[in-house]
Image (cartoon, grey):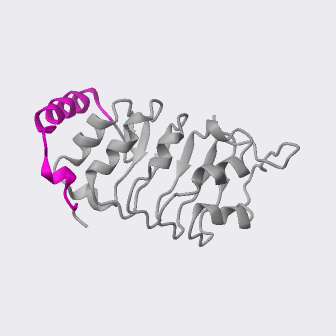
Amino acid sequence: MFEVPVDFSFKRLESVADALTVEPNGSVRPLKRNKEGKIRSKALRFNNNHITDVSGLINTVMALLCEAPRLAWLDLSFNEISHISPVLTELKELRVLYLHSNNVCKLSEVDKLSVLPLLHTITLHGNGMENERGYRGYVIAVLPHLKTMDFSAVTRQERVMADIWHKANRRGNAARQGPGNC
């Protein structure tokens, strides 16, 4: 579905823009490129690096991929990201987002992703927000199209309970807007 992922994992990258200075990891299946040298893929791996924020992501994606606006799968796991950047909301075709094992503390950071209509899979475990009361229900309520969260299927009952819980706690919940558990 997403072709061969362009893999920049374990490259010691400090920013996503650093990917423009190194070659992606090899794969069993070779990457396909167009005449301009851009890669034919809708999937990027930036996992296991030292990335602290994703500013420059759009420019990096545009430079690397021939169908940049159609990026559908993004792995930013095992980095040092502390905030969910609004730049992710520009990826309107994003379906899968791995953000596990980062430093995101505030559960309210997830709210930014609610504008992604096709996002159906997300991982957030291993972040400080995971310790917030109602973590899973909150994320499911905020991201209504989720089918999988933290590598576990979202059930119909979870969706109903999350919706009820979210409606009951929506008004000024200081725990969601506060400093988080980091």
Q: Which of 33 and 30 is in front in this view?
A: 33
Quadrant including the C terminus: bottom left
Number of numbered discs overlaid on the protein picture: 0
Q: In this view, does 148 lie to the left or right of 30?
A: left
Q: Which residue lies furthest to the bottom in this view?
A: 12
Q: Position of residue 83 (x, y in %)?
A: 38, 58
Residue occupying image coordinates x 22% and y 28%: 157
Residue occupying image coordinates x 54% and y 61%: 47
Q: Where is residue 115 in the image (x, y as percent from the top left)?
A: 41, 34
Image position of 167 with respect to 7: above or below: above
Residue occupying image coordinates x 62% and y 45%: 43
Quadrant including the N terminus: top right
Image position of 141 with respect to 177: above or below: above
Q: Which of 10 and 144 is in front in this view?
A: 144
Q: Where is residue 160 in the image (x, y as percent from the top left)?
A: 21, 27
The segment highlighted magenta reads 154-180
Task: Specify the quadrant of the image occupied by residue 179.
Answer: bottom left
Task: Specify the quadrant of the image occupied by residue 180.
Answer: bottom left
Q: Is residue 88 left or right of residue 8?
A: left
Residue occupying image coordinates x 88% and y 43%: 35
Q: Is residue 178 left or right of residue 76?
A: left
Q: Nearer the viewer, residue 140 or 26?
A: 140
Would you say residue 157 sits in the magenta stretch? yes
Q: Where is residue 31 in the image (x, y as percent from the top left)?
A: 77, 49
Would you say residue 51 sits in the magenta stretch? no
Task: Specify the quadrant of the image occupied by residue 104.
Answer: bottom left
Image position of 148 with respect to 131: above or below: above
